[in-house]
Amino acid sequence: MAYGSFRQFVDALEKAGELTRVAVPVDTDLLIAEWANREMKSPDGGKALLFENPTVEGKPSQFPLAINTMGSRRRMALALKVDSVEDLAQEIQLILKAKPPTDLREGWSLLKQGLHLLHARPKHSKEGACQEVVHLLGERPTPNAERRTPNAEGLTLSDLPILKCWPKDGGRFITLPNVHTRDPETGARNVGMYRMQIYDDLTTGMHWQVHKVGARHGKRYYERKERMPVAVTLGGDPAYTFAATAPLPDGLDEILFAGFIRKKSVELIPCKTIELDVPSDVDFVLEGYVQPGEMRPEGPFGDHTGFYTALEDYPVFHLTAITHRRDAIYPSTIVGVPPMEDFYMGDATVRIFLPVFKMNFPELVDMTLPPEGVFHNLVFVSVRKQYPYQAFKVMHGLWGMGQMMFSKYIVVVDEDCDVHNTSEVLFRLCANTDPERDSTIIRNPSDSLDHAPTLQNIGSHMGFDATRKLPGENYHRNWPELAKMTDEAQALVDALQKKTR
Ligand SMILES: Cc1cc2nc3c(=O)[nH]c(=O)nc-3n(C[C@H](O)[C@H](O)[C@H](O)COP(=O)(O)O)c2cc1C
């Protein structure tokens, strides 16, 4: 069954030998980040870390902090409560291929799918653990008024163990926030992960980039000159956090997706100061709003790219309440030069959604976004090629699909090449391409974080067809055969080597 709290997940990590507890006080200003970076760079993503006594400006925080909880394939599977994320891919494939059952076995399997889909629908309740402790923070007289001193028991952002990740960061950043918004016209809900820079006790930046759904919802509110309610949740079942990062098509509700993957309906409860619902079992809820037209410089921030992203104007989030569980754990991550924890989140997304890609591209065999490419910079795809220029058709299709539009370099190889083996893909790329004939350059939207394009958000992308050439692909020689050992010789040497060990 699903995790009832983030703490339950942390306990499960510990039971599985995947967690290291750190009892000594460690400061949230760079030191936790440095510790976590070492862990994330160790083989297979190291361990998750639970800092039991984090300090903020030298003072103890009342909340422990967990980091790197999803930073390996094993922990990612534990987060989603599966043996392997391929189990979820298989379920999605079954749903995509579902047709009326022809026998009892198929009927039973479909019924099971139906039940999981039923879980996708959220439930509603009036109260939940995330509101065990409530701090109503009131409002400032004007958005830019002086920093407000909270009343004696009022918890503010300064009380959370929020990290400063890199030396030249503009401040502390909430790095694993699930940002809940609604489209004011359709009522459609969205949950996205957009980092939040702490400006003071009660305000933060809201870093939704221009292509993201939160930004689109925001634009609708600004056009209507209406204040935009925003709720930020931290923790709870890790399925929520994973769903917030998944590049679901705009309009596909992350709460439904989370319910589907955790095989249990998400229970939603109303916020205390804004008209939004949030999962009842998360660790923290930051309630607040974004005021139309109010922008403020955000950054710099040591980003996924491995470089600092520069100062840029982003909307401002004003806090009206913090609610939390009594046993809350503050979840966080750091991003930077790969590999980092986020690689495993992206990797799981590609593996889970592979059936959806395959439905769009029947020739697609496998696909991966290697860590060196930090998500969108590099995509390796293997295909079963049947007709000339099919590799180019796949590239163009990918460039037209949601956030795959950002893919800077796409390399297409034949089905017998393992896309998860970067050196094998590079071998095919170098050996099988004539650069002029086998490459294409297009113009497309670029990832806002990419510092290389001349202008932000637009740029060129390049595709390589590293497959063997078919007649009709402007190759007029005989394509050579790859030198491979026979299966028989391999089996014999396997047996001989076993004997000599
Ligand atoms: C750790 C982490 C931090 C992220 N930070 C941001 C961010 O600050 N701004 C942003 O636009 N996307 C960020 N993303 C990527 C988005 O969460 C991702 O593109 C997601 O699909 C957006 O959801 P949406 O399509 O509902 O807008 C981050 C992803 C991860 C894993």
Image (spheres, rainbow, N blue to C red):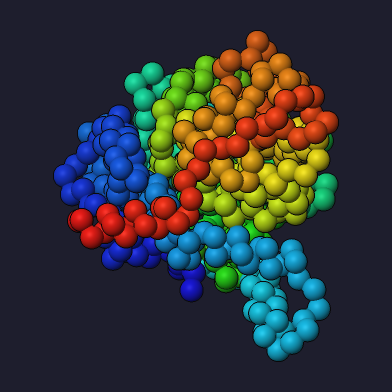
Q: Is residue 142 visible in this depiction of the protein? A: no
Left or right, 102 with respect to 168, comes to right
Residue 299 percent across, percent down from the top left: 50, 22
Residue at left offset 54%, top offset 34%:
425
Compared with 112, 178 (above or below) is above
Quadrant showing the C terminus: bottom left
Left or right, 57 with respect to 81, comes to left
Residue 294 percent across, percent down from the top left: 65, 25
Return the residue found at the far left: 24
Q: Is residue 102 visible in this depiction of the protein? A: yes
Left or right, 419 with respect to 395, comes to left
Compared with 276, 115 (above or below) is below
Query: Hey, which quadrant is residue 376 in on the image?
Result: top right
Residue at left offset 77%, top offset 81%:
101
Residues 209 and 54: in front is 209
Residue at left offset 16%, top offset 44%:
24
* Number of marks: 0
Residue 245 percent across, percent down from the top left: 57, 45
Residues 482 and 465: in front is 482
Return the residue found at the far bottom: 104
Residue at left offset 28%, top offset 57%:
496
Residue 138 percent across, percent down from the top left: 53, 43
Left or right, 306 with respect to 389, comes to left
